[in-house]
Image: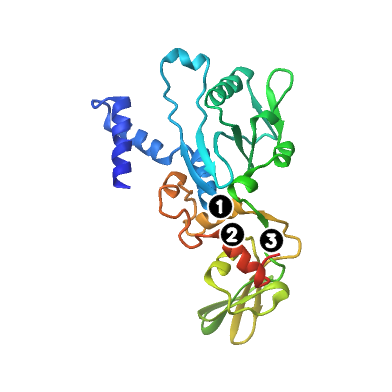
Amino acid sequence: MADDDDRLIQEVLAELGRDADPAQIAEQVRRLDRGLPAEDEFIAVCSWLGKTRLIHKLDQHQAPSHSRAVYQVPDLLAMYENSGPVLIEVKSKKTPTLSFRPDYLARLQAYADVLQIPLLIAWKYHGIWTLFEARHLSLAKKNFNIRFDAAMTENLLGILAGDVAYKIAPGAGVHLRFKKEELLASEETVEGLNEQWQMRVDKVGFTSAGGTPADTLDNDVTTLFTTWDLSERQVHSESHIEMQFVAGEDDGMMFGHMALVHLLNWPLRDGEQINWRHAIRRESVVGNLANFTQALQRALSMSVQN
């Protein structure tokens, strides 16, 4: 990361000048270090899903200046296992319709036409990524639009990058048993007796579909539990408290690219946000689950996902 930090500082000094206020320089370095979250997140998603041969940003400081009237350089260039090079324009919008001005889309398409490379649009809407060909944008009154449901219908993220939908089997989960060692405090409340105990974990177990004990699950499969919003239940006895974290019946489905967000958020402190720029510069985007597809295949064979 040191060489990358040096490049950031050099870039800021080139923009602001060496006589700029140090506080302004520091703030600009911090801003650049946070990166362009949507672009960096999409690169991380593609890198992690497993079918990307190459993906990188395109420098958009184009020259000469009058070329901007004709061409717009897209955000990314990518090559997937089953594709040649493609150009990708990245958008993150919270409205259910994505819109492009005709002149902006024409400049993007002009650049793609010169290189004879397909132009794709990557769109993040409420945490869900879609990737579709720009030709699916249709002219409305003024702009070229696409609704999210149509983008999902034309989504290429699974075909190209390897995205999948999966579901943790109902009843599968993590079970922690705590042995009560010392009663620290006891208080009567309107809801009943509230006790505070000093405890230690004396058993960790796992279950597969239907709550069947499955204590031989490997690390990658158990890591999948951190990608799911498991329901919590406590079972109390005189000597122990068992905390059960299991998948429910009606939890729906999850996309692989959304699981990545859960995995990266897992070790963060409250209020801390994912730095996508740092994530894409690591050797592995996620250190504790390098091959998501293989983990899902093993989880399926062990009745942990369906």
Q: Can you tell which quarter of the image residue 83 is in? A: top right
What x and y, as percent, mark residue 163? 62, 51
Where is 198 relative to 143, above or below?
Answer: below
Question: Does the residue at mark 1 contact the one at mark 2 (Cβ under 8 Å)?
Answer: yes
Q: Can you tell which quarter of the image residue 105 is in? A: top right
Q: Amino acid at mark 2?
A: Thr
Q: Which numbered tag is attached to residue 167?
A: 3
Dot 3: element? loop
Dot 1: element? helix
Q: Amino acid at mark 1?
A: Leu
- Residue pointed to by mark 1: 49
Q: Whole-Å distance between the Cαs marked 2 and 3?
A: 13 Å
What x and y, as percent, mark residue 113? 57, 24
N-terminal label among 2 and 3: 3
Q: Amino acid at mark 3?
A: Lys
Q: Residue furthest right?
A: 250
- Residue pointed to by mark 2: 293
Where is 267 relative to 63, above or below?
Answer: below
- Local crowd size for mark 3, using a 10 Å CA cut-off: few (<14), some (14–19), many (≥20): some
Of residues 212 and 34, the one nearer the viewer is 212
